Amino acid sequence: MSEGGGTGDLGAVLERLWATIETRRGGEPSASWTAKLLADPRLAAKKLGEEAVEAAIAGATGDAAALTAEAADVLYHLLALLAAAGVEPAEVAKVLAAREGTSGITEKASR
């Protein structure tokens, strides 16, 4: 296990990350990247988009190590954007749960 620890349990890691992001709310943007993202949802959205493109490129080129690192960046920036926009991860989980067992094609057609 690396320094900084944690397990490979994605759910547990994301819960800890969300809690850490929330502790940065109201922090000094010049001292914390997360506080800066929380203070500027447009910046948070822009950074998420940039990281998503980098992840897509890594995936398309078959670079598993780069994709893994970029996916971590995407997840962090997604959580930061959700926090900046006042959207709780539980709200996203409800939408995902409602879609479980539904064909993606069927679900998209119902919107």
Image: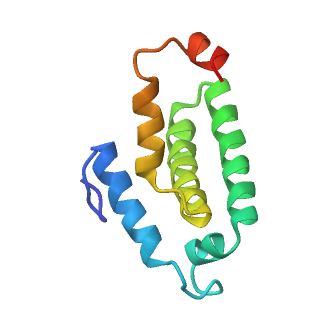
Question: Considering the image in quadrants, where does the C terminus appear?
Answer: top right
Query: For this view, does 15 lie left or right of residue 27?
Result: left
Q: Is residue 16 above or below residue 110?
A: below
Residue 24, given in percent of the width and then of the height, sits at 49, 78
Q: For this rendering, which residue is in front, 65 or 70?
A: 70
Q: Is residue 27 above or below residue 73?
A: below
Residue placed at 61% from the left, 62% from the top? 85
Query: For this view, does 56 lie left or right of residue 86?
Result: right
Residue 12, given in percent of the width and then of the height, sits at 28, 51
Residue placed at 44% from the left, 71% from the top? 22
Q: Quadrant of residue 42?
A: bottom right
The residue most toward the front is 110
Q: Quadrant of residue 19?
A: bottom left
Q: Is residue 11 visible?
A: yes
Q: Quadrant of residue 33?
A: bottom right
Residue placed at 42% from the left, 41% from the top? 93
Q: Is residue 61 visible?
A: no
Residue placed at 40% from the left, 49% from the top? 90
Residue 94, given in percent of the width and then of the height, sits at 42, 39
Q: For this rendering, which residue is in front, 50 or 103?
A: 103
Query: For this view, does 97 lie left or right of residue 65?
Result: left
Q: Is residue 1 above or below residue 99?
A: below
What color scheme is it? Answer: rainbow
Total labels: the figure holds: 0
Q: For this rendering, which residue is in front, 109 or 76?
A: 109
